[in-house]
Image (cartoon, grey):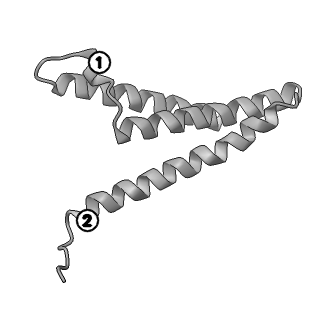
């Protein structure tokens, strides 16, 4: 149930992010509001990963088909993708705050 809650929260955050961007546009356009950004991509990947994890545990309780192992295996690459994207984004943002050393 925890992963379903995480998926729901991530979905709501994704909708709020798209709605806020739609309201912020001078000429509101749905295509521009749903444009992929780092924040929206993170919400989407967390949504997808948590749904796969929740579905894995749901299916495992009822029956155990052989392909459910791949759902468990796909969770960790998504988690690592999110983590590396956050680190890269943080490094890019922080590079603007630190003075560059000129040699």
Of all residues shown, which one is farthest toward the left? 26
Question: With respect to residue 87, does 1 lie above or below?
Answer: above
* Residue picked out by circle 2: 95
Residue 33 coordinates in the image, percent (x, y):
27, 23
Quadrant occupied by the C terminus: bottom left
Q: Of helix, strand and loop, which one carries label 1?
A: helix
Q: Of helix, strand and loop, which one carries label 2?
A: helix
Nearer to us in this view, 83 or 7: 83
- Looking at the rendered structure, which numbered label has been put on residue 31? 1
Q: Residue at x 58, y 44 (%)?
A: 78
- Looking at the rendered structure, which numbered label has been put on residue 88? none
Report, in whole angstroms, how far the alpha carbon at label 2 lies from the one at label 1.
31 Å
Q: Residue at x 87, y 31 (%)?
A: 66
Nearer to us in this view, 58 or 90: 90
Image quarter of residue 38: top left
Quadrant occupied by the N terminus: top right
Q: Residues within 10 Å of mark 2 (few under 14, many from 20)?
A: few
Image quarter of residue 6: top right
Q: Which callout, 2 or 1, points at the residue further toward the start of the chain? A: 1
Quick check: marks 2 and 1 in contact, CB under 8 Å? no
Is 30 displayed left or right of 48 in the figure? left
Residue 3 coordinates in the image, percent (x, y):
62, 36
Residue 41 coordinates in the image, percent (x, y):
42, 37
Residue 62 coordinates in the image, percent (x, y):
86, 25
Q: Residue at x 88, y 27 (%)?
A: 65
Is 34 displayed left or right of 43 in the figure? left
């Amino acid at each position: 149930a925890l992963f379903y809650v995480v998926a729901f929260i991530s979905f709501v955050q994704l909708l709020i992010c798209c709605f806020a961007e739609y309201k912020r546009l001078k000429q509101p356009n749905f295509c521009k509001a749903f444009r992929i950004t780092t924040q929206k991509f993170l919400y989407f990947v967390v949504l997808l990963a948590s749904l796969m994890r929740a579905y894995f545990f749901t299916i495992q309780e009822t029956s155990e088909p052989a392909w459910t192992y791949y759902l468990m295996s796909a969770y960790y690459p998504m988690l690592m993708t999110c983590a590396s994207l956050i680190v890269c984004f943080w490094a890019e943002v922080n590079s603007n705050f630190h003075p560059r050393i000129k040699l």
